[in-house]
Every structure is written in structure tokens, then in C-alpha cells.
Amino acid sequence: MTPSVLKHLTAGVALAASLGAGACGGSVENEVSLVSTLGEADKRSNVSDPQFVVESVTIDGTARPSILARPHSRLTYKVTVPPDAWLETAFALKPEAWDQPGDGAQFRIGVSDGRVYDELLRQYVNPKRGDRRWFTARLDLSAYEGRQVSVIFNTDPGPPGASSDSNNDLAVWGEPRIYSKR
């Protein structure tokens, strides 16, 4: 982990701890907002237009600070996983895409220790089939406790293995964060 990333992650954890942020009905002791540390993430994409834009996205009256990550894209955060850690995020296609041509996008989250990649989430979202909402994921990271790993967010176009159509794939990750109750 670079000193700059460590500084930002430490600052994020200290800020969340001082705020006493809560999640899932419990008290959160440590939290890192992956939106606020986006500048330190490794960003890869084949999209030439503005990519990895932070914006507020509202779906069904719920606004979330979000990262636009149009397919094909990959965001990689290097983190040292604290005890009892969880990764929580929402994901969706922006409402502006719902009635436009396109066939949806696939969202994937995985963890890599540099040797092995463990996929923790794979979800295809297509507004044409009714996927017009925030999807949420709460992923247990306790298996990686104390280890430095890469947490990887991927978006791919269309149905898995069946499409390369990225038209109007306005994929967003809403409020991604890593937190611990310890």
C-alpha cells in the first residue's frame, strides 16, 4: 500500500470512528468510504468518455453518492482488512438508461491476495426486464482479516458471455464502503 493510500484510508477510518457512523442496526467503529478514496484506486476502462465520475444518483427516492463505472471498467482498492470487516454497496443502472437502447450490465466484486481471486458477487442488471432499483450487497470480508488485499469492482456489458453491447450502460456503484464493528 502506498503511503498516500494508507494516509487516505487511515483518515477515512479515523473520520468514521469519530462520527460514530452506524450501519445495519449496529454501531460501526471503523469505516472507509470508497467514494471518498476513489482518487487512490487503480482505475481501468476501455471507455473514452468521462469515466469514474462521482455523482449523486437517486432511484426510488433514495439518493446515494455513487461512482459511474460504465463497462468495461475495473476499480481496484488496496486495503488491509480490519477485524470483522464487511464490504457494503448498492449498484444499479442510472434511471437515464432505463428507456434507452441497451441490454444491461453485469456487476462483479472480488478479492485478490495477488495469487488467488475470489469472486464474491456477480449480478446481471437489465432495466428492460424490470431491474429498475438499487440492488444491495453486504459481503463478509472476515476471511481476509489482517491481510493486505485488492478489492476489485468490475462492470461488464450485457448478459454474461453473450453480449458486448455497452450502449447506455450507465452502471453505478452506490456508497461502496468497508466497515468494521470493532
Image (cartoon, rainbow, N blue to C red):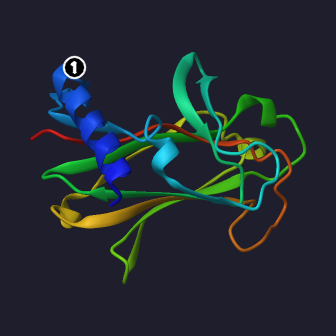
- Residue at 36% of width from left, 84% of height from top? 115
State the residue in front, 119 or 103. Answer: 119
| Left or right of 100 in this view: 13 | left
Point out residue 44 in the picture as x, y percentages from the top left corner: 63, 61
**For mark 1, what is the residue?**
19
State the residue in front, 173 or 131. Answer: 173
Mark 1 is surrounded, within 10 Å at the Cα level, by few (under 14), some (14 to 19) or many (20 or more) other residues, namely few
| Left or right of 30 in this view: 114 | right
Q: Is residue 84 visible?
A: yes
**Rendered view: 58 above or below 122:** above
The answer to which image quadrant residue 128 occupies is: top right
Point out residue 2 in the picture as x, y percentages from the top left corner: 35, 58
| Left or right of 130 in this view: 55 | left
The answer to which image quadrant residue 52 occupies is: top right
**Rendered view: 77 above or below 52:** below
Give the residue furthest to the left. 182
- Residue at 29% of width from left, 50% of height from top? 6
- Residue at 17% of width from left, 61% of height from top? 145
Give the residue furthest to the bottom. 115
**Rendered view: 43 above or below 134:** below
Point out residue 141 in the picture as x, y percentages from the top left corner: 26, 57
State the residue in front, 75 or 101. Answer: 75
Which residue type carries mark 1? Leu
Quarter holding the C terminus?
A: top left
